[in-house]
Image (cartoon, grey):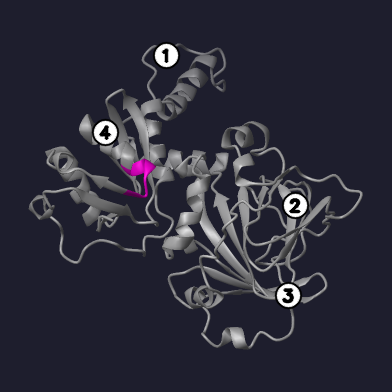
């Protein structure tokens, strides 16, 4: 930390990390450094494994090289296996998106942060950097927990920015032209830095073999929501649902659009968008739409009700699938999985809530014997959202 500068509060042990206090005092308000969040930290992914993922066509990856002061070069993956042996002497960083979808050990890093609703969680991006490598000073429109996995990284954090902040000229990177750090820390393995939306930050590797796990959260813009919901509403409207004015009165000026006409036209638009139940059904599907549908867990042969073992059965969720629910009543929920909704009642509703709460779970034989429960589980297995797992 630079001397003479105010610092973000530090939490010195996992026991001090109170989620309720964090949400009340810190979430989306200020950065927070958490030292030794995992006292028994073990890096879940080797650098060679990350490089291997970056070579696969279905994995989104980027390579950022800091070629000169104020100059960065960006390459998009997938990369040839020998690319990393030809990077030259300039500092560089490899960034791989949604690694949690491919590596179960990385997916487990999300669990401590699930005091924040699942629908807000985006993915775990993993970066590997050479000495001096980094993505450049920037700001994000979403919350992020930066978990230091291997090596050391110096993080500098500045003021909160908005879209008016000047950027360096670059087609693929949104890097700040004027970055003025106010706080600075060097993170060791097991440390975490939380950065709220809009805060300028810059991470630079201190030494080689620097790996950072970025647990990012989704924050849909108002424009995205309005546009997507409007498109959905348009798909539900009938061509013959048109403006009418049976009580039309002659206006003094034929060029005037009367207040009554404005009111009727406005109501046509607003009422089509104002159905809260219709919006709830849509938003559940919208926020659970998978980020990448190429990770397919569906069985080669479809499963039927008769294929389910009539005993206690363990399951695990596809880490690339999204699960959420909206409560309908004390005994019913609408379950959303990968963009599809399903009304669950009674025992099935309780199973749906459990599926949303637990990445791995076991259902008792008597629960599996319920036809509605069995039908739900079979559907999720055949869609590749769930897979049977051996009971420990």
**Helix, strand or loop under label 1:** loop
The image quadrant where one finds the N terminus is bottom right
x and y percentages locating residue 171 in the rendered image: 67, 67
- Residue shown at the point (56%, 54%) measured from the top left: 215
Residue 256's place in the image compared with 326, above or below, is above
The CA span between labels 2 and 4 is 43 Å
Work out whether mark 3 precedes mark 4 in sequence or the reverse, and give the earlier one.
3
Work out whether mark 1 precedes mark 3 in sequence or the reverse, and give the earlier one.
3
**Helix, strand or loop under label 4:** helix
x and y percentages locating residue 154 in the rendered image: 75, 62
- Residue shown at the point (31%, 63%) measured from the top left: 296
The mark closer to the camera, 1 or 3, is 3
In the image: residue 125, left or right of residue 271: right
- Residue shown at the point (77%, 63%) measured from the top left: 168
In the image: residue 294, left or right of residue 125: left
The residue beneath circle 2 is 200
The mark closer to the camera, 2 or 4, is 4
Q: Nearer the viewer, residue 229 or 21?
A: 21
Q: Nearer the viewer, residue 338 or 204?
A: 204
Q: Residues within 10 Å of mark 2 (few under 14, many from 20)?
A: many
The residue beneath circle 3 is 131
Residue 42's place in the image compared with 166, above or below, is below
The residue beneath circle 1 is 248
Specify whether residue 233 is in view.
no
Q: Which residues are magenta?
A: 355-360
């Amino acid at each position: 930390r630079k001397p003479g500068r105010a610092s973000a509060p530090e939490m010195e042990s996992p026991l001090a990390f109170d989620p309720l206090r964090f949400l009340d005092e810190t979430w989306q308000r200020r950065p927070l450094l958490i030292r030794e969040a995992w006292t028994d930290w073990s890096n879940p992914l080797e650098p060679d494994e990350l490089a291997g993922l970056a070579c696969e066509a279905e994995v989104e990856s980027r390579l950022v090289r800091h070629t000169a002061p104020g100059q960065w070069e960006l390459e998009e993956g997938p990369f040839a296996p020998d690319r990393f042996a030809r990077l030259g002497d300039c500092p560089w960083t490899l960034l791989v998106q949604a690694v949690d979808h491919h590596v179960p050990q990385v997916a487990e890093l999300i669990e401590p942060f699930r005091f924040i609703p699942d629908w807000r969680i985006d993915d775990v991006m993993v970066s590997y950097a050479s000495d001096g490598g980094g993505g450049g000073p920037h700001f994000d429109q979403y919350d992020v927990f930066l978990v230091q996995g291997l090596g050391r990284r110096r993080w500098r954090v500045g003021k909160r920015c908005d879209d008016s902040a000047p950027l360096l000229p670059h087609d693929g990177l949104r890097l700040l032209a004027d970055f003025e750090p106010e706080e600075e820390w060097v993170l060791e393995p097991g440390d975490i830095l939380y950065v709220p939306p809009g805060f300028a930050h810059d991470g630079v590797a201190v030494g080689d073999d620097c790996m950072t796990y970025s647990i990012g959260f989704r924050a849909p813009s108002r424009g995205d929501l309005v546009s997507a919901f409007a498109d959905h509403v348009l798909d539900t409207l009938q061509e013959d649902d048109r403006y009418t004015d049976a009580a039309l009165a002659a206006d003094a000026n034929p060029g005037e659009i009367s207040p009554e006409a404005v009111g009727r036209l406005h109501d046509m638009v607003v009422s089509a968008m104002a159905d809260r139940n219709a919006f709830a059904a849509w938003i559940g599907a919208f926020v659970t739409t998978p980020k990448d549908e190429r990770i397919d867990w569906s069985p080669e042969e479809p499963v039927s009700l008769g294929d389910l073992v009539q005993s206690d059965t363990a399951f695990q969720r596809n880490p690339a699938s999204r699960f959420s629910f909206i409560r309908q009543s004390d005994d019913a929920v609408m379950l959303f999985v990968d963009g599809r909704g399903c009304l669950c009642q009674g025992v099935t509703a309780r199973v749906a809530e459990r599926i949303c709460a637990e990445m791995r779970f076991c259902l008792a034989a008597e629960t599996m014997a319920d036809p509605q429960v069995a039908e739900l589980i079979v559907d999720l297995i055949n869609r590749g959202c769930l897979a049977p797992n051996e009971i420990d």
